[in-house]
Image (cartoon, coloured by chain):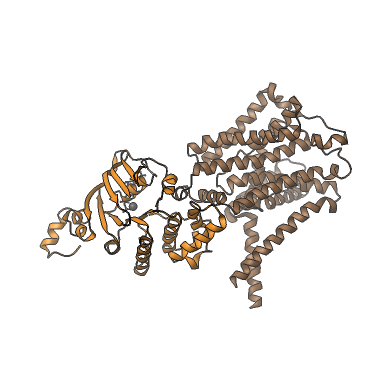
Amino acid sequence: MLDVSSLTKRFGGLVAVNGASLTVNEGEIVSLIGPNGAGKTTLFATIAGFLKPNEGSVVLDGQDITGHKPHEICRRGMVRTFQVVKPFAGLSVRENIAVGAHTRIAGREEALEFAGKIAAHVGLTPLLDQSAGDLTVAGRKRIELARALATQPKLLLLDEVMAGLNATEILEIVEIIQQIRDSGVTILLIEHVMQAVMKLSDRAYVLNYGEIIAEGSPVEIAHDPKVVEAYLGHGASERMKSAGGADA
Amino acid sequence: MSMLTTMSTGNMQRIGWAVLIGALLAAPFAIHSGRWMEFIELTLFAALLGQGWNILGGYGGQYSFGHALFFGTAAYLQALLQYKLGWSPWLTLWIAIGGSVAVAAFVGFLSFRYGLRGSYFALVTLAFAEAFHVLSRSLVSVTEGGRGVQLPLNQDPEQALATFQFTFAGPFLSEAGYYYTILIFLLIGFAVTGWLNHSRFGAQLQAVREDEDAASALGIDPFRVKMSAICLSAGVTSLAGIYYVQKFLFVDPGIAYGPGKSVEALFAAIIGGVGTVLGPLLGSAFIHIVGEFAKETIGAMLGDRPGVDLILFGIILVLMLAYMPRGLVGLVELLWRKLITKRGGGNA
Ligand SMILES: Nc1ncnc2c1ncn2[C@@H]1O[C@H](COP(=O)(O)OP(=O)(O)OP(=O)(O)O)[C@@H](O)[C@H]1O
Ligand SMILES: [Mg+2]
């Protein structure tokens, strides 16, 4: 469904994404993990059209969308959420979600009604009439998710929708994401919460210093020495083995 | 319970609108003082300017400091095509609207194509208005320069409608013709903003105002939305220019493109409440009442000092922005909610 090949994005001298390639197949949940500053968000932004890549290509459903505008890409069925949430603070929760719904629904009443349905899926029903600016972190993360869902995407790119949530909230979101996948939406997600990555993903990619350093099932990834080193520093993998092979 | 309150609020709103529009329609029958009617007419005029500005500034978050550009272009086209070519005002008004929208498309394209936002956009609109100001003064062969364009007064009642001039239009229209002209134009402005509140385009425009990146992630093309908004905004503002020329039969560079109209538009909308249907009318009424009051009191103390009222408005604007960013409409809503909760508490 999504084919990213040798994508490179530079900011001046800094190479934030360096020749990254990845594939997402229909119906999968694929995770993208990596240490802070690895370039995950930049990779998302480049895939979704917010940044122009310096090299490489993005192909969605067999069509080259490299360098297309974000709104065009959204209309083709790929939508991203923002790690730093961007609620429309002056609008109510329902109106926020309706903005997404309007991508495919012209009528105002229909869009507002559809927003109500989406809100029910992500547990926002009690907050529908509140101003989006008044919500807690957890609420705002749900708005990001709900608005994206309301565009009726084929492929959903989620950037750390669990950051800042407590354990219960994380369990709820994990369940919601599973339901979204079961409803036929393919998902690529960036996540630091490893427990969620293990539980949700069919496959995972690891990004470090802008390069994909590993790919595989979550379990394979967790035991990959390169990955352990990326997270814990050079030589960590050796140290861990000699310390008795603790699970990552 | 909350369902009941929202329903009654909705009905209240509808009733409020009906009363307001009914009162405005009936005003000439009830008010026989020419001075008062003139006062209300000027209030509606400033409300229309404010409503034009509000479409782009209030709903779209793109604060223009140069809306005189759209007022003045329409005023000049409306005046010059009649004056120089002898065209019917009913034909020139379409060209006036079209010309204004074309200028808006040009300025919008330059600004939005290159991603100008916030104060940069405000400065660009201000600069364009000033450029047109200078041009209208210097292109004497086209615009008659600083002397301005004076249209001949029609004194034949038979020709009143054909010339779109009501001064000699018979007993009723000579009193109320211009009043109904500005009222109809303002109702068009209300209709446009009302539509923004209940349409996909309006939702997308407000989304762009709140966050452009989030909007574009959700399938909205901010450039297209802002272009549409500036054109719509100019179209409504141009109606004020058409009214002005038909009423005063005169336009000159200062009236058309000077900062006065830009400021009036912005004041009315911001004081009344940006991004609301009623804001510009409330703001305009407030400004005119306070202005009149200031003239009476401060004028009596200091003698006639033009500009004193502007200083006062400047102070009010700053206080507004600091303490009441939602303007008078926000204040009214707050009081209304207090009233409802009190009433609800009383019933319980
Ligand atoms: N617009 C930008 N201009 C310049 N440098 C940037 C820009 N955006 C990101 N960077 C840099 O690119 C690198 C990758 O940042 P990015 O936000 O993609 O990392 P990340 O993997 O998402 O990190 P985190 O897990 O903290 O979210 C960082 O060094 C960051 O400072
Ligand atoms: Mg990130």
Q: Which chain is brown?
A: B
Nearer the observer, A64 or B190: A64
Q: Name the spot of residue A51 as percent of width and height, x first.
A: 37, 43
Q: In which quarter of the image is residue B102?
A: top right
Query: Is residue B334 in view from this perspective?
Result: yes
Query: Tag count in the figure?
Result: 0
Q: Which chain is orange?
A: A
Nearer the observer, A59 or B312: A59
- In percent of the image, x 74 and y 41: which residue is there? B305
Query: Is residue B300 in view from this perspective?
Result: no
Q: Name the spot of residue A164 as percent of width and height, x first.
A: 36, 62
Quarter containing the N terminus of chain B: bottom right
In the image, residue B79 above or below residue B64: above
- In percent of the image, x 18 and y 64: which residue is there? A247
Q: Name the spot of residue A210 as percent of width and height, x first.
A: 27, 46
- In percent of the image, x 63 and y 26: which residue is there? B135
Nearer the observer, B124 or B246: B246
- Specify whether B272 is left or right of A175: right
